[in-house]
Image (cartoon, rainbow, N blue to C red):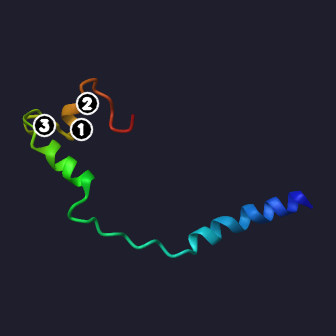
Amino acid sequence: MARTRNLLAALLLPGLLAAQEPAPAEALPADDPVLAQLDALAILPWLLNDPFTADTASLNVHGFAPHE
């Protein structure tokens, strides 16, 4: 009996979760302290002059194939 109940729950739970409405996105307040801290960090000279890149060709220094 418990096995049947667990099987039924395992089959129905994903469908019930997928059927729920997504939660509405909340707007960020203008005086959000986290955003203020991120803005303060963004103007630091060592971050402004950071040579960050997302170019996979320049980051692939070991010559890996694209699927590896």
- Outermost residue toward the top in this view: 62
From the top left corner, tell me how far across and down residue 28 is, in percent. 28, 65
Give 40 or 1, whichever is nearer the viewer. Answer: 40
Give 19 or 34, whichever is nearer the viewer. Answer: 34
Give 45 or 49, whichever is nearer the viewer. Answer: 45
Quadrant showing the C terminus: top left
**How far, Cα to Cα, is label 2 from label 1?**
6 Å
The residue lying at 87 percent from left, 57 percent from top is 3
Q: Report helix, strand or loop for mark 1.
A: helix
Quadrant showing the N terminus: bottom right
Q: Which residue is mark 3?
A: 47
Left or right of 17: which side holds 45? left
Q: Report helix, strand or loop for mark 3.
A: helix
Instruction: Check if mark 2's residue and mark 1's residue have beta carbons within 8 Å.
Output: yes
Q: Which image quadrant for residue 32?
A: bottom left
Identity, as a three-letter code, of the amino acid under mark 2: Asn
The residue lying at 47 percent from left, 72 percent from top is 22
Instruction: Check if mark 3's residue and mark 2's residue have beta carbons within 8 Å.
Output: no
Left or right of 25: which side holds 43? left
Identity, as a three-letter code, of the amino acid under mark 3: Leu
Q: Which residue is mark 1?
A: 56
Dot 2 crowding, Cα within 10 Å, few <14, some 14–19, many 20+: few
**How far, Cα to Cα, is label 1 from label 3?**
21 Å
Identity, as a three-letter code, of the amino acid under mark 1: Thr
**Disc marking residue 27:** none
The residue lying at 81 percent from left, 59 percent from top is 6
Left or right of 32: which side holds 50? left
Q: Which residue is mark 2?
A: 60
